[in-house]
Image (tube, grey):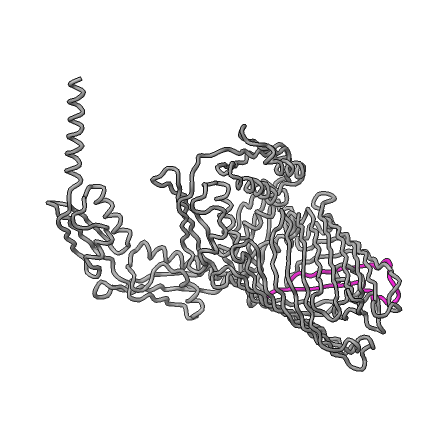
């Protein structure tokens, strides 16, 4: 017992002794070697004051803090006789940074965006090398793939330096050709439409995507990978991408793809803790039954995880995590979604770094977690994906740190801004005439996450212009708000003696009301001027004048497609109604469209669609000619656009009602060796009827139908579409069109 007491006393003595030795008091602070930086500033950096306690750990922390300021090349810290001595050797200060070899002010501004070193800042070799790498990547992004950068340092008096970047830009590296090799399943023309890079053409004077850009190539690979994953190719491998020099600064961009075999959903199970109520997960089990034996789709997996996200909002399930166990058996993938409870941990703080343009609230609006919330790994991952989906940032990284309190965590999110503006120009011509268009779009206006879009389209007889502003998350409500200004002109003065000018605006909101179901509410308002001359019909002359119309717009969009671009399965159901609020004619318009996508055999994509339209006056007035309905040309091939249905003299005036049924099916066995040609078979049936102002002009409800083949050809100058159609049923006076082509391109 006495030995035990003696041992305790010795331990206490040593603890006291060590504390006295290693935790003494600072009576004096001596700072040497500093020239520009004052003693007081260094003391602040070191976070020390007279009478502070000092220890070895504190000395190490002072060294770390001073080095992290990036002002000092060398730092020494000593403590003797109650005096803390700090010896520093300051880095030189950068006086000027010169970029030799670049004359363009626009290019200089672009490469200096988010630069790492600046005038009047400390110079060190590590940061300089990082800046050189950043410059090299940035210049290559712009298209100068063969550029070279050298650095010379000019030492000046007073510990100052000038930094010279000697840049040889060379010529821009043009993408002359884009090729896809390997077991790629899909044809080149389809894959080219997926990726961001595009082939160089002399008329593409606006687009920067025609130059070789390593970052854009990485985006291409992600787009390709997601497309294959969404079409059943679970094991796809984008093995490599490389650029082959084929001419003077001209490259062939080659993607090596191995799609492997197509995979289908097999058995899907949900593994829950024993104390969880299965009824709360019934929607997930129902979804499992719906997708069994269907092609694997990454979008479907995300939908399952979204359902799990919803469940995690219930208080009893806040501390859960989900993992997916995969087992491939032949052409089936069996998935087990394992739900397990986690330790109760809360979010103490969320920090966001790198957003020099985008406002912080725009980023925080994408977070499914907030400070003080339970930490949920599922919601955390979804938050990061939400930020990435904004498409405002080049990179989005994250870090989760523990705190002194073991029950809380700190989340750090690091973003790197990127340009978010777009410029586009289009041109097209065909048997139905020619058109040109131009557009400017900014997706993150002044960092507020607001989208601005301005565009116009000009053809031989019409003009359409639009300027719109969209806030995708107005007032943190998860509802989008849009405002649009519109102007249209249809000039038929020479042919039929009338002309219509319409200007106005739309304002409304759109939001997800239920899963995959979006609801839109808005109002459209137009001022229209109709002019006629003596060659116009009596009815057209009677409608001459000025009109103001206001409508309530409601639309319902139920979207179950596997993907919005190049859809291969699922369906889309859309209904829109325009209710007159203030109108001389009180025209009520309805539009319904249903499209279903499926495959009849391997590599085939088929679709069947149904359309209904109507326009009638609630007060039994005659609707204006500009409000009457025509069948869209894509809904009735084999006939000239707008040249079927009721006629007033020689003028096709449209109808009060229209309907169409369309079937199309690709024929992959044809042109199998041609990578830029696709052939499809189609069958169209449509009708247009109703003339409210003169029933004698109405036709007898004749059905128009046609069948034929359409060919999509991805030509060197842009996508070219041919259709060869045979009208089956028609009415006398209808204008048929056996052959049609359209050619479009971008700049």
Q: Quadrant of residue 739?
A: bottom right
**At which x and y percent is residue 642?**
78, 66
Depth check, front residue: 429 or 202: 429
From the viewer's perspective, tell me whether residue 122 is left or right of residue 734.
Answer: left
**Residue 278 higher or lower than 475, as above or below:** above
Q: Is residue 741 magenta?
A: yes
Quarter occupied by the N terminus? top left
Farthest residue toward the bottom?
534
Depth check, front residue: 93 or 371: 371
**Residue 494 higher or lower than 311, as above or below:** below
Q: Tell me the magenta residue range.
A: 718-747
Q: Is residue 436 visible?
A: no
From the viewer's perspective, tell me whether residue 704 is left or right of residue 544.
Answer: right
From the viewer's perspective, tell me whether residue 398 is left or right of residue 38.
Answer: right
Identified at 78% across, 60% down, the residue is 637
Depth check, front residue: 441 or 719: 441
**At which x and y percent is residue 291?**
66, 39
Depth check, front residue: 468 or 742: 468
Q: Is residue 126 visible?
A: yes
Q: Is residue 55 magenta?
A: no
Farthest residue toward the top?
1
Dominant secondary structure (helix, strand or loop) of the stretch shown in magenta: strand
**At which x and y percent is residue 349?**
40, 47
Quarter occupied by the C terminus? bottom right
Q: Quadrant of residue 271?
A: top right
**At which x and y percent is residue 81?**
10, 45
Q: Quadrant of residue 80?
A: top left
């Amino acid at each position: 017992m006495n030995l035990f007491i003696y041992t305790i006393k010795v331990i206490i003595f040593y603890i006291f002794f060590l504390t006295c030795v290693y935790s003494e008091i600072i009576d004096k602070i001596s700072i040497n070697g500093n020239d520009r930086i004052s003693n007081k500033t260094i003391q602040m950096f070191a976070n020390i004051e007279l009478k502070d306690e000092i220890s070895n750990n504190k000395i190490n922390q002072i060294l770390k803090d001073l080095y992290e300021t990036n002002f000092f090349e060398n730092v020494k810290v000593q403590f003797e006789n109650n005096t803390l001595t700090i010896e520093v050797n300051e880095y030189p200060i950068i006086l000027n940074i010169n970029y030799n070899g670049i004359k363009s002010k626009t290019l200089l501004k672009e490469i200096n965006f988010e630069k790492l070193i600046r005038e009047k800042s400390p110079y060190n070799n590590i940061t300089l090398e990082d800046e050189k790498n950043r410059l090299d990547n940035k210049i290559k992004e712009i298209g100068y793939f063969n550029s070279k950068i050298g650095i010379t340092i000019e030492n000046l008096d007073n510990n100052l330096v000038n930094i010279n970047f000697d840049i040889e830009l060379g010529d821009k590296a043009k993408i002359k050709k884009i090729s896809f090799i390997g077991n790629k399943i899909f044809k080149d023309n389809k894959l080219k439409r997926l990726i961001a890079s595009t082939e160089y053409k002399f008329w593409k004077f606006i687009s920067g995507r025609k130059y070789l850009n390593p970052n854009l190539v990485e985006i291409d690979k992600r787009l390709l990978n997601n497309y294959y994953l969404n079409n059943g190719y679970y094991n796809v491998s984008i093995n490599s991408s490389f650029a082959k020099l084929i001419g003077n600064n001209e490259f062939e961009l080659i993607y090596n793809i191995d799609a492997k075999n197509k995979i289908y959903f097999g058995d899907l199970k949900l593994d829950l803790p024993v104390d969880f109520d299965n009824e709360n997960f019934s929607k997930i089990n129902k979804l499992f039954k719906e997708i069994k034996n269907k092609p694997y789709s990454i979008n479907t997996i995300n939908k399952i995880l979204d359902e799990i996200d919803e469940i995690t909002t219930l208080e009893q399930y806040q501390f859960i995590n989900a993992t997916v166990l995969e087992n491939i058996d032949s052409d089936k993938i069996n998935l087990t979604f394992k739900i397990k409870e986690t330790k109760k941990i809360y979010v103490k703080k969320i920090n966001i770094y790198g957003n020099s343009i985008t406002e912080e609230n725009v980023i925080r609006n994408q977070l499914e977690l907030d400070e003080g919330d339970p930490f949920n790994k599922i919601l955390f991952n979804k938050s990061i994906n939400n930020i990435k989906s904004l498409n405002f940032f080049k990179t989005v990284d994250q870090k989760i740190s523990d705190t002194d309190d073991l029950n809380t965590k700190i989340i750090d999110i690091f973003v790197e801004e990127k340009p978010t503006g777009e410029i586009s120009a289009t041109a097209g011509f065909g048997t139905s005439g020619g058109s040109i268009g131009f557009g400017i779009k900014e997706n993150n206006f002044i960092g507020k996450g607001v989208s601005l879009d301005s565009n116009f389209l000009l053809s031989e007889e019409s003009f359409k212009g639009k300027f719109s502003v969209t806030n995708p998350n107005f007032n943190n409500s998860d509802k989008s708000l849009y405002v649009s200004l519109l102007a249209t002109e249809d000039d038929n003065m020479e042919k039929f003696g009338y002309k219509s000018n319409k200007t106005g605006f739309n304002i409304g909101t759109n939001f997800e009301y239920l899963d995959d179901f979006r609801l839109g509410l808005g109002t459209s308002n137009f001022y229209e001027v109709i002019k006629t001359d003596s060659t116009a019909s009596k009815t057209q002359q009677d409608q001459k004048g000025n009109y103001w119309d206001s409508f309530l717009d409601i639309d319902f969009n139920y979207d179950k497609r596997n993907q919005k671009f190049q859809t291969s399965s699922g369906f889309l159901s859309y209904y829109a109604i325009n209710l007159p609020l203030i109108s001389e004619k009180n025209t009520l318009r309805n539009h319904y469209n249903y499209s279903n996508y499926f495959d009849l055999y391997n590599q085939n994509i088929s679709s069947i669609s149904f359309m209904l339209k109507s326009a009638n006056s609630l007060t039994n007035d005659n609707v204006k000619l500009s409000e009457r309905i025509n069948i869209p040309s894509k809904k009735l091939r084999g006939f000239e656009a707008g040249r079927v249905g009721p006629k007033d003299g020689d003028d096709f005036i449209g109808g009060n009602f229209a309907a169409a049924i369309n079937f199309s099916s690709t024929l992959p066995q044809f042109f199998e060796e041609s990578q830029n040609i696709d052939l499809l078979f189609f069958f169209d049936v449509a009708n247009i009827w109703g003339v409210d102002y003169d029933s004698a002009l109405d036709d007898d409800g004749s059905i128009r139908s046609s069948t034929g083949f359409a060919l999509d050809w991805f030509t060197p100058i842009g996508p070219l579409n041919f259709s060869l159609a045979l009208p089956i049923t028609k009415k006398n006076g209808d204008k048929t069109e056996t052959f049609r082509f359209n050619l479009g391109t971008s700049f």
